[in-house]
Structure formats: C-alpha cells, structure tokens
Amino acid sequence: MSVFKFKQFEVDQQGCAMKINTDGVLLAAKASHPSPAEILDIGTGTGVIALMLAQRYPAARVEAIEIDEQAASTAEYNFQQSIFKDRLVGRHVAIQDYVSDKQFDLIVSNPPFFLNDLRSEERRKGIARHADLDFFNALVVKSSGLLNDGGRLWLILPPKQADLVVGIAALNGMSLLERIQIHSDESKPVFRQIIVLGKANVELLESHFFIYQSFQQYTKPYEQLLKDFFLAF
C-alpha cells in the first residue's frame, strides 16, 4: 500500500526507498522540547517524522532535508497535501552540504545505520540504509553548529551505533542527556536506542520502552504514545 493514513494527515510512500517504520514513528512521537520554534528533520524520507512533529508542535516551523531526490520530491508532495503545509519546507540536500543561518531548538534524525555492513544491491536503498563513519561525524558536527544553546539532537539507532555517536558527540562539545532503551517486549534485549544530545551539562536520564506486551498486542505506553496519530488507536 503506497498511502499510509494517519489521523490528521496522509503519507504517500511512492518512490521512497525506505518506507514508514517503527523507528521513525517512535522517534517522532518521543522527541521533545519545551517550546520549539524551529525544528530540523535530517533524512526525512517520506516526510512522516516532520509531519508528526508539525502536528505535535503547532507553533513550530519544520524544515526537512533529504539526500535522495525522488524521496525529497515525495516528502514535499506530502507536506503540500497536509494541513501543516504553511509550516513545513522540504529541501533536496545532504547534511554534509546543508547550510542555514538559523539556530534550531530541536533536530531529529532516523539515520542510516548499517555501518560497514554489506551494501544493498539496490543503490538508492543502500544510501537510505547504510552509513559510514564520515556520515556520523558530519551529522554530529553539523547538528552541533545548527543547535542553539538549549537545543536538543534526538536520534534513533542500534546500540552499537548509538555508542559510536555518543563518542563523536563528546569530541564536539555535546553530551548525552537522555537514553531510551527500546525493546520489542520484556523478554527481548535492547534493539534500538533513542539518544538525546545537547550542549547542556545535566544528569543523564535513562529509561526503557517496550513495544509489545504479548504476541501482536501492543503495550499501553506504546498505544498512548501513538494514539494521536494511528487510526488503530
């Protein structure tokens, strides 16, 4: 199915190498800031994260960048079809080449993460799913320069890559402020981490989040988190 329907908007996924997934919607629903005026979504894909953040923060302007030209075009189409179109802008540009005179309150990214793994045979899907060390360096360095002093960078990654990014951040004046360990259910190990990086020096917040309570049965916290978005809830 090409079109995914949410409560307040629709997302056409046609032409996007990476479709809507749990990682993206979890990040978009979890990423927070007291009152963001400017939000940046790095690697927007279909545009779903930017759309969810536009819904959550009615006073915010959301900019979304995407390296893949076809995906960037699809995201912009989704933005223009939404009720949030006046506060959303999409750009076809890689983070390495992105330039802005703005300072952002909130930056989010569901980045490619198969570091040094076998590349996908399909080139566009390979770009969407794979990264190298230079990419993570660019992501952190650029984000550090784009964030204001109270700004936050929210990322979702597998644990190994999350640890790598935390190390890069420490070399670039950013600290780990929060870490959310994501499990499929209580019997499964952590398979993703949501990490929050910033320039502030505060005590680290640690928590765990479970998606399922039993086979095909979502936990109440998961349903509560996504009830404003998913038709099923």
Image (cartoon, helix red, strand yellow):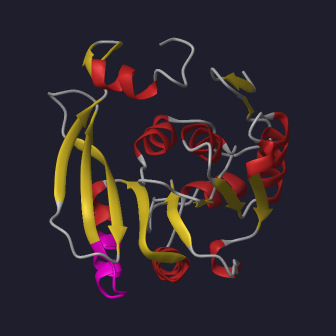
Q: Residue at x 37, y 22 (%)?
A: 224
Question: Image quadrant of residue 149?
Answer: bottom left
Residue 188 left/right relative to 139: left
56 drawn magenta: no
List x then y, in percent, for residue 129.
Answer: 56, 55
Q: Residue at x 48, y 76 (%)?
A: 148
Quadrant of the rendering where the N terminus is positioned: top right
List x then y, in percent, for residue 98.
Answer: 69, 77
List x then y, in percent, for residue 226.
Answer: 45, 26
In the image, residue 127 sits, relative to residue 167, either above or below, namely above
Residue 10 left/right relative to 141: right
Task: Give the extent of the magenta segment.
Answer: 164-175
Can residue 210 be seen in this snapshot? yes
Can residue 122 be seen in this snapshot? no
In the image, residue 210 sits, relative to residue 79, either above or below, namely above
Q: Nearer the viewer, residue 177 or 195?
A: 177
Q: Residue at x 39, y 29 (%)?
A: 225
In the image, residue 19 sits, relative to residue 152, either above or below, namely above
Q: Nearer the viewer, residue 36 or 222?
A: 36
Callout count: 0
In the image, residue 159 sits, relative to residue 96, either above or below, namely above
Q: Residue at x 69, y 59 (%)?
A: 63
Residue 58 left/right relative to 36: right
Q: Nearer the viewer, residue 27 or 193?
A: 27
171 drawn magenta: yes
